[in-house]
Amino acid sequence: MPISRRRNNGNHVRSFWEESKMQYFAGTREFQIKEPTAVTIGKFDGLHRGHQKLLQHILEQKKNGLEATIFTFASNPTRMLSGLSAQNILTNEERREMLAKAGVDNLLECPFVPEIAHMEPERFIEEVLVGQLKMKFAAVGTDFHFGYQRRGDHAMLQKLAPKYGYTVEVVEKEQSHGRDISSTYIREALHDGNVKLANELLGYRYYVSGIVLHGRQIGRTIGMPTTNLLPPQEKLLPKDGVYLTRTFVKEDEYYGITNVGYKPTVGGETRRGVETYLFDFDGDLYGQDLMVEFIEFRRPEQKFQSLDELKAHILSDMNWGKSVARQI
């Protein structure tokens, strides 16, 4: 039975996300929304189930004539200030695409400049949220902090609501396995190669997207042509190894096996890449835009003694992948 499927529509992600038009501001402090808004504020790395819960609250306000608006940052301030890796679960481009499909009206990716970093909380409310965003409703999490040295929180936002003419809804965090769902939790799962858990926390399958590049064509020499993606360095990749994946190609989708890593058997690469063998596909995808969803971890990346040994393991991985895919 072929392990491929015709897609019902061109949408890459699950039914939570819908098509819409979105106004987008990036790289500037000079923005001004004209209509009253429902706002949520945060880093939104991964757009996981907790983020989706906040999004639903502002999307519901559209029926009251408010524009659903996201205020976030082009770079994660917490990770920047702490010196942690700047890699993100979603690239900014992927996040923009998903928010547009969710029905968000305005997305502001504010630069984390000194003016913003040192702004006192009440000034941020008055000048940015109310002044520039015309905020009439805010949805924030229980752990929400803002302003210089994180001095502002949801209690302050609520206390100042009558003064500035908005309402606030404080949203409880989503949990899974007795733990708050967070980007940190998802990062840990990806680091361990546990894409099943990461997908559960995200509420959709973790994915990598990009343009198919020319590789060394080693796969063709052993009768197993592959697609090669080189994600931007800001993209957080899962643990090096082999995974069952599903790849979207225009209006079609194909299951396959994907190797994440440096391909040590064939001489190695200087950057981590994503190489996929598609089941039941025979065509040329160079230059095309693909999205690869990760389903299940198979094994760590290995260096084999020969191409024959590599081919034998790939065949074993393929048989495993097809068996699992038939049960999905």
Image (tube, rainbow, N blue to C red):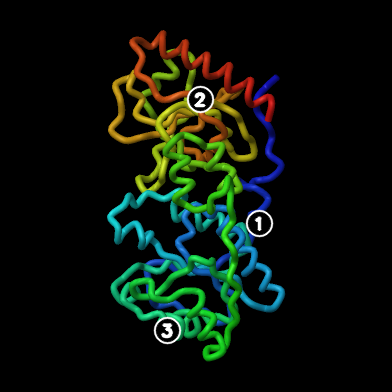
> Label 2 to label 1, Cα distance in Å?
32 Å
Q: Which residue is mark 3?
A: 122
Which corner quadrant holds the C terminus?
top right
Q: Which mark is residue 18?
A: 1
> Label 3 to label 2, Cα distance in Å?
51 Å
Tell me the residue at 44%/55% (across/down): 92
81 relative to 131, above or below: above
Tell me the residue at 42%/31% (across/down): 260
Q: Is residue 252 visible?
A: yes
- Upstream in the sequence, badge 3 or badge 1? 1
Q: Which residue is mark 2?
A: 298
64 relative to 176, above or below: below
Q: Which mark is residue 189?
A: none
Residue 295 at x, y percent in the picture = 57, 34
Q: Is residue 98 left or right of residue 63?
A: left
- Upstream in the sequence, badge 3 or badge 2? 3
Q: Nearer the viewer, residue 108 or 302?
A: 302
Q: Is residue 24 visible?
A: no
Mark 3 vs mark 1: in front? 3
153 relative to 101, above or below: below
> Label 3 to label 1, Cα distance in Å?
35 Å
Q: Quadrant of residue 252?
A: top right
Element under disc 1 = loop
Q: Nearer the viewer, residue 149 or 54?
A: 149
Tell me the residue at 47%/65% (across/down): 42
Which corner quadrant holds the N terminus?
top right
